[in-house]
């Protein structure tokens, strides 16, 4: 089946409805750190283009004066606070406290007034104050960028949906270590849990605020 045929099959089955942007969006930059950008890192994913897109989205969000939040992963030495996840993925050693690979990607450093959510698992919502913070800010829509598409972006988008926030995933501003995995996860998110949009669509929405 062609890509167009697959998309039409899903639509006919009742998937892929559009949710649309709400009135009060926020941006979350998911885990965009040096571990995915440093070629010597086990998590290097070749996502430099996604970083540049994310920088543009971040600048537009700041200009629109919407809330901006960042997630980052941090484990204590030994990874006991990472539980089964830390045992499953050896590369999570990159995020043990003090490892420079856990630092923010160049151009994606949080501003002083932006919330940083520290997490130990894939979703930005799991075991954190993210949902409460968004609710207190009156947010109804979460624009999601970052890495990796199949991991923390997907988990955060799914939990945004489950917490009652419309997830808007910016295709160009997310990345993964394999393009096939990236595209498959974007397809599934767009079919079931989120609206997947282009960078330009997100920028147009932000410029209209």
Image (cartoon, helix red, strand yellow):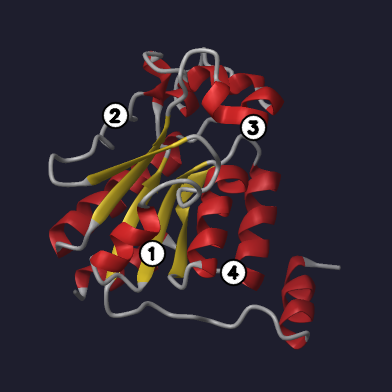
Give the mark nearer the N terminus: 4 vs 2. 2
Circle nearer the viewer, 3 or 2? 3
Marks 4 and 1, how far apart at CA: 12 Å
Dot 3: element: helix
Q: Which residue is mark 4?
A: 193
Label 1 neighbour load within 10 Å: few <14, some 14-19, many 20+: many
Circle nearer the viewer, 4 or 3? 3
In the rendered structure, the answer to whether residue 191 lies left or right of residue 157 reads: right
Circle nearer the viewer, 3 or 1? 3
Dot 2: element: loop
Q: Residue at x 41, y 14 (%)?
A: 99
Q: Which mark is residue 106?
A: 2
Q: Which residue is mark 1?
A: 142
Give the mark nearer the N terminus: 4 vs 1. 1
Give the mark nearer the N terminus: 2 vs 1. 2
Give the mark nearer the N terminus: 4 vs 3. 3
Figure check: 196 above or below 81: below
Label 3 neighbour load within 10 Å: few <14, some 14-19, many 20+: some
| Residue at the limit of the structure toward the right, as seen here | 1
Q: Which residue is mark 3?
A: 85
In the rendered structure, the answer to whether residue 161 lies left or right of residue 64 reads: right
């Amino acid at each position: 089946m062609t890509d167009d045929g697959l998309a039409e099959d899903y639509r006919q089955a009742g998937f892929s409805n559009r949710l649309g942007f709400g009135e009060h969006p926020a941006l979350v930059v998911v885990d965009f750190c040096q571990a995915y950008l440093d070629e010597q890192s086990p998590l290097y994913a070749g996502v430099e283009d996604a970083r540049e897109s994310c920088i543009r989205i971040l600048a537009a969000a700041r200009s629109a004066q919407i809330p901006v939040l960042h997630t980052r992963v941090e484990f204590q030495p030994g990874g006991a606070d990472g539980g089964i996840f830390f045992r499953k993925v050896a590369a999570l050693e990159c995020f043990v406290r003090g490892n420079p690979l856990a630092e923010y990607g160049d151009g994606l450093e949080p501003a002083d007034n932006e919330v940083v959510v520290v997490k130990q698992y894939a979703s930005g919502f799991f075991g954190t104050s993210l949902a409460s913070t968004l609710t207190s800010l009156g947010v109804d829509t979460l624009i999601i960028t970052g890495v990796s598409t199949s991991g923390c972006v997907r988990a955060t988008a799914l939990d945004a949906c489950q917490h009652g926030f419309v997830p808007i995933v910016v295709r160009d501003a997310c990345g993964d270590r394999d393009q096939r995995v990236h595209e498959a996860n974007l397809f599934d998110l767009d079919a079931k849990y989120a609206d997947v949009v282009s960078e330009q669509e997100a920028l147009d929405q932000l410029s209209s605020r």
